[in-house]
Image: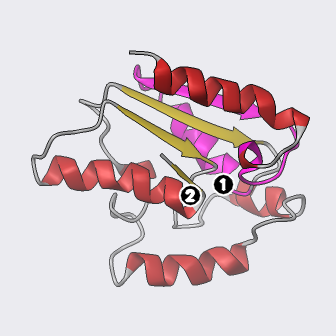
């Protein structure tokens, strides 16, 4: 489980485990995960106008050290491009005012049978971590997802 860049790490770690032929987790949760560090989705720049937590300037800085010389389309950098077969369940949580949402939404549209995608309305980046009433539903979903066997 991870949020923001930690969500990218959680999702990319699956790709590492697959490449190394190691045991895969049964579940993974990404809260506002950075799915695609290419920053080539035009919708990101529209959402950026409303996202008061993260912007593309910060993302460019983060991605340069995070990629550490790897291509941004490498699934170890941008989990959007990964293979998620063999993972029992994935839960991704996002909101429409979150700069990570356009790519997370596109990832959800891939229709992976093991993916649950929860998209809230105009809430900030990593909103389930905030003590606000609007985050309660997402937190409950995460808790029940993790408890379910």
In three-dimensional space, the C-alpha distance between marks 2 and 1, rounded to whole angstroms, equals 6 Å
Q: Vertically, is 56 above or below 7?
A: below
Q: Identify the residue at image location x=31%, y=30%.
A: 26
Based on the picture, tell me whether residue 27 belongs to the magenta stretch: no
Label 2–label 1 contact, CB within 8 A: yes
Instruction: Confirm whether residue 35 shows in the render.
Output: no
Please give the residue where the numbered disc 2 appears in the rendered image.
Answer: 34
Can you tell which quarter of the image residue 143 is in? top right
Q: Identify the residue at image location x=71%, y=80%.
A: 57
Q: Identify the residue at image location x=76%, y=52%.
A: 98
Q: Vertically, is 97 above or below 56?
A: above
**Residue 39 or residue 125, whichever sits in front:** 125
Q: Vertically, is 115 above or below 41?
A: above
Instruction: Confirm whether residue 41 shows in the render.
Output: yes
Tell me which segment is drawn in magenta: 99-128
20 on left or right of 3: left
* Label of residue 100 in the image: 1
The image position of residue 27, as x and y in percent, is 38, 32
The image position of residue 144, as x and y in percent, is 57, 20
**Residue 73 or residue 21, whichever sits in front:** 21
The image position of residue 58, as x and y in percent, is 68, 78
- Name which of mark 2 and mark 1 comes first in the sequence: 2
108 on left or right of 67: right
Local secondary structure at mark 2: loop
Rendered-image quadrant of the C terminus: top left
Q: List the single residue furthest toward the top.
A: 149
139 on left or right of 49: left
Q: Identify the residue at image location x=41%, y=49%.
A: 11
Local secondary structure at mark 1: loop
Count of all numbered marks drawn on residues in the image: 2
């Amino acid at each position: 489980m991870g949020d923001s860049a930690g969500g990218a790490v959680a999702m990319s770690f699956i790709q590492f485990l697959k490449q190394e032929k190691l045991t895969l987790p049964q579940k993974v949760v990404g809260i506002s995960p950075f799915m695609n560090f290419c920053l080539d989705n035009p919708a990101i720049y529209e959402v950026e106008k409303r996202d008061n937590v993260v912007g593309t300037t910060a993302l460019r800085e983060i991605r340069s050290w995070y990629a550490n010389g790897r291509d941004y389309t490498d699934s170890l950098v941008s989990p959007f491009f990964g293979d998620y077969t063999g993972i029992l369940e994935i839960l991704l949580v996002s909101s429409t005012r979150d700069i990570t949402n356009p790519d997370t939404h596109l990832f959800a549209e891939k229709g992976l049978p093991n993916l649950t995608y929860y998209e809230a309305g105009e809430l900030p980046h990593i909103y389930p971590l905030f003590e606000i009433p609007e985050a309660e539903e997402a937190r409950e979903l995460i808790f029940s997802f993790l408890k379910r066997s």
